Image: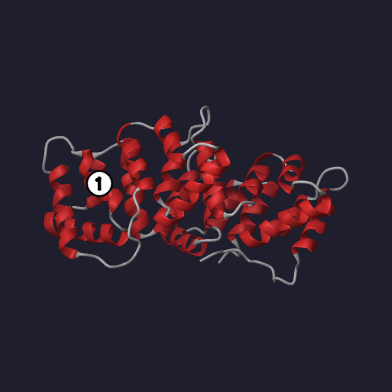
């Protein structure tokens, strides 16, 4: 469920473009007016605004936003403007660029997306970057983390809810034999099962694992694997089970400790606003006894804060 409080379609993209042009005029931009428009338009409306602005003013609105805004607000607004698949491609490209490597972001984006979403993303990545996503993954990752990333982006997975219980029990047994039962870990088995099975099937494996061996699959992963490979497996499992709970935790961690991890904070808010932010907010409150809006309010400031809070919607 989206948190985006989209204004009625009676507001035309042309009118939005005119108002944005006005907000850019003069000395310094009217950031509040820019936020008031863009934070309340869905992906389709934002695409129309970009077209209208180009037609009317012979200028790319993204370039204009770049020159008018600054700091975290600029980064967040520019991340918000593309459609979801284009945005994912942009995040991955940046996160796989030498000097800016962010493999946690790569892990989060790739393993929380469906097979169908990844196919679109890969096409956009190739047309925008002139290189294949798989190629960049090979360049910037290593070992088992690399193997599961490549398997996950290349293998189509069934996305439905039907589960073969017998097969789930076999998979649970295979994982037990490859992990807790033996000395050392057979990572190949984990890569194969986690990259080829549907979300519903993985949840069934988790249940079978507990029923058959009395322990949790999550604990087994933590015991048998480490680093980014462990993070990948846990992300797959948690997103199969409850993506909102997973993202609530990512957001919580981004605001813990000294300073705020703004890169993660804005990435998750911007990428989930039009998908399941209402659920994430509910999970956040349930687990941390504080509203996500209040947490963001206390960790951010200025127009950057206003923009993120506009995306989050009312504080329930």
Who's the residue at 57% across and 42% down the image? 128
In the rendered image, residue 5, in percent from the top left (x then y), is placed at 63, 66
Q: Determine if residue 262 is in view.
A: no
Who's the residue at 49% across and 62% down the image? 276
Quadrant into which the C terminus falls: bottom right
Picture quadrant where residue 141 is located: top left
In the rendered image, residue 307, in percent from the top left (x then y), is placed at 66, 53
Q: Residues within 10 Å of mark 1 (few under 14, many from 20)?
A: some
Q: Determine if residue 178 is in view.
A: yes
In the displayed structure, does residue 106 sit left or right of residue 220? right
Which of the pair 39/195 is nearer the observer?
Answer: 195
In the rendered image, residue 269, in percent from the top left (x then y), is placed at 55, 53
In the displayed structure, does residue 7 sit left or right of residue 239? right
Q: How many marks?
A: 1
The outermost residue toward the right is 26
The outermost residue toward the top is 99
Secondary element at tag 1: helix
Who's the residue at 54% across and 37% down the image? 130
Residue at the spot of label 1: 192
In the displayed structure, does residue 220 sit left or right of residue 239? left
In the rendered image, residue 151, in percent from the top left (x then y), is placed at 33, 44
Name the colouring of the figure: secondary structure
Which of the pair 217/123 is nearer the observer?
Answer: 123
Placement of 84 over or under 65, stated as above or below:
below
């Amino acid at each position: 469920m989206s948190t985006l409080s989209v204004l009625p379609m009676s507001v035309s993209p042309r009118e939005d473009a005119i108002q944005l042009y006005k907000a850019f005029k003069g000395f310094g931009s009217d950031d509040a007016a820019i936020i008031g428009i863009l934070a309340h338009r869905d992906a389709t409306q934002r695409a129309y605004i970009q077209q209208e602005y180009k037609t009317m003013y012979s200028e790319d609105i993204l370039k204009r936003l770049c020159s008018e805004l600054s700091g975290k607000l600029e980064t967040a607004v520019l991340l918000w403007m593309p459609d979801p698949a284009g945005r994912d491609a942009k995040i991955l490209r940046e996160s796989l660029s030498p000097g800016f490597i962010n493999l946690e972001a790569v892990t989060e984006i790739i393993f929380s997306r469906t097979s169908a979403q990844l196919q679109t993303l890969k096409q956009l990545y190739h047309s925008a970057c002139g290189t294949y996503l798989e190629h960049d993954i090979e360049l910037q990752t290593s070992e088992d983390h690399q193997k599961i990333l490549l398997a996950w982006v290349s293998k189509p997975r069934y996305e439905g809810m039907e589960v073969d219980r017998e097969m789930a029990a076999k998979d649970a047994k295979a994982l037990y034999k490859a992990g807790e039962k033996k000395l050392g870990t057979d990572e190949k088995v984990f890569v194969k099962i986690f990259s080829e099975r549907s979300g519903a099937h993985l949840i069934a494996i988790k249940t079978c694992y507990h029923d058959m061996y009395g322990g949790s699959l999550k604990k087994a992963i933590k015991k048998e694997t480490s680093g980014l490979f462990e993070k990948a497996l846990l992300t797959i499992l948690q997103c199969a089970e409850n993506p909102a709970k997973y993202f609530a935790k990512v957001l919580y961690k981004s605001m813990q400790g000294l300073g705020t991890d703004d890169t993660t904070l804005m990435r998750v808010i911007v990428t989930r606003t039009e998908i399941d932010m209402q659920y994430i907010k509910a999970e956040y409150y349930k687990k941390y006894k504080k509203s996500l809006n209040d947490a963001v309010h206390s960790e951010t400031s200025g127009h950057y804060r206003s923009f993120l809070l506009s995306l989050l919607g009312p504080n329930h």
